[in-house]
Image (cartoon, rainbow, N blue to C red):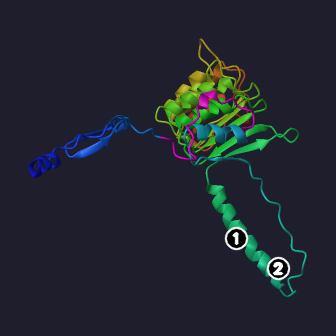
């Protein structure tokens, strides 16, 4: 009896259904499938997928369209669209200089100094300055000064500038243009309103001096300023050919400012040759260049009136 009892006690237990023993561990039914499935990755709370800038429909309000397109392209810090500042009127003190200073006035003076300091820092921050029409507050002029305009920024402008129906002028001062970005800028000009007639590119020297492309036969620019661009005699030759040749002539440009460049007597001769068959240009400035008597004589030979030579 005792032998049978011990044999019965030593018999192995039959595993319960629903469990499986493997290498010393017990796994419940269905756990293997759960482990093989990859966990779903959820986007972090508060983050949104980047929006496609091509899907955005511009409203015609530059202060809305420009930051929206910048955000859609991934910019986190971009220039603000602000109204162009005007010179402050002079302030005349009404009190006599012999009066004792008022403590309230002194505190006000300190506050004004702080505001003045802050305004100076704001002045040097990159902005897109706009000048508005007095009646309907639509944008009529754009000023960009002292920050690099990249290819992507020009792509944004190509979408948000065409809806500006009253745009008349674009001014780019020291924005780091290259020959490539100038070509992109020229390509967006026909997309803009027909009211756009004035372009100013100053302080943007280009290695290939391709400014003459702004004066192509299909150009609608009437007023062009190219001051301070290090234009030399070779650049003047290209500009002279854009004014006119025996086979073509620019018929839209009315004023051209070439002041503060490096044009010499040879370049003045090229400009004079371009003026021989050009009948649309009414005003030309060559002030502060390197033109001497020889170059001035060449300009005089084509009948440059007072105000067209510099």
Q: Which mark is residue 114?
A: 1
Quarter of the view holding residue 106: bottom right
Between residue 28 and residue 200, name the one nearer to us: 28
The percent position of residue 60, horizontal first and vertical second, equals 75, 33
Q: Residue at x 70, y 31 (%)?
A: 58
For the question of whether residue 285 can be seen, the reply is no
Residue 113 in the image: state x and y as whole percent: 72, 72
For the residues labelled 2 and 1, the Cα–Cα distance comes to 14 Å
Say which quadrant the C terminus sits in. top right
Give the structural element (helix, strand or loop) at label 1.
Answer: helix
Q: Is residue 162 above or below residue 107?
A: above
- Answer above or below: position of 235 versus 77: above
Q: Position of residue 211 (x, y in %)?
A: 56, 30
Residue 119 appears at what percent x and percent y? Answer: 69, 62
Residue visible at 62% across and 19% down? 244
Quadrant assignment, res 171:
top right
Mark drawn on residue 240:
none
Q: Residue at x 57, y 27 (%)?
A: 212
Dominant secondary structure (helix, strand or loop) of the stretch shown in magenta: loop
Residue extending farthest to the top is 247
What is the magenta range? 42-62
85 displayed left or right of 154 = right
Q: Are marks 2 and 1 in contact (CB under 8 Å)?
A: no
């Amino acid at each position: 009896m005792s032998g049978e009892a011990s044999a019965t006690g030593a018999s192995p237990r039959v595993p319960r259904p629903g469990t499986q023993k493997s290498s010393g561990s017990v796994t419940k039914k269905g756990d293997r499938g759960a482990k093989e499935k990859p966990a779903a990755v959820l986007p972090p709370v508060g983050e949104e997928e980047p929006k496609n800038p091509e899907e955005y429909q511009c409203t015609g309000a530059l202060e809305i369209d420009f930051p929206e397109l910048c955000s859609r392209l991934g910019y986190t810090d971009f220039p603000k669209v602000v109204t162009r500042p005007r010179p402050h009127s002079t302030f005349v003190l009404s009190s006599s200089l012999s009066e004792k200073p008022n403590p309230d006035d002194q505190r006000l003076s300190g506050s004004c100094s702080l505001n003045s300091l802050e305004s100076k820092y704001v002045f040097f921050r990159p902005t897109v300055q706009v000048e508005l029409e007095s009646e309907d507050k639509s944008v009529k002029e754009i000023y960009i000064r002292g920050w690099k305009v990249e290819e992507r920024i020009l792509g944004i402008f190509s979408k948000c500038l065409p809806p500006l129906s009253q745009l008349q002028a674009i001014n780019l001062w020291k924005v780091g243009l290259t020959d490539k970005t100038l070509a992109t800028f020229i390509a967006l000009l026909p997309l803009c309103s027909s009211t756009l007639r004035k372009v100013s590119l100053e302080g943007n020297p280009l290695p290939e001096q391709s400014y003459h492309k702004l004066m192509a036969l299909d150009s609608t620019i009437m007023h062009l300023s190219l001051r301070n661009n290090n234009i030399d005699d070779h650049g003047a030759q290209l500009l002279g050919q854009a004014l006119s040749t025996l086979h073509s002539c620019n018929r839209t440009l009315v004023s051209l400012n070439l002041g503060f460049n490096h044009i010499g007597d040879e370049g003045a001769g090229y400009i004079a040759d371009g003026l021989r068959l050009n009948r649309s240009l009414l005003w030309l400035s060559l002030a502060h260049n390197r033109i001497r008597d020889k170059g001035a004589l060449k300009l005089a030979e084509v009948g440059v009136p007072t105000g067209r030579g510099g």
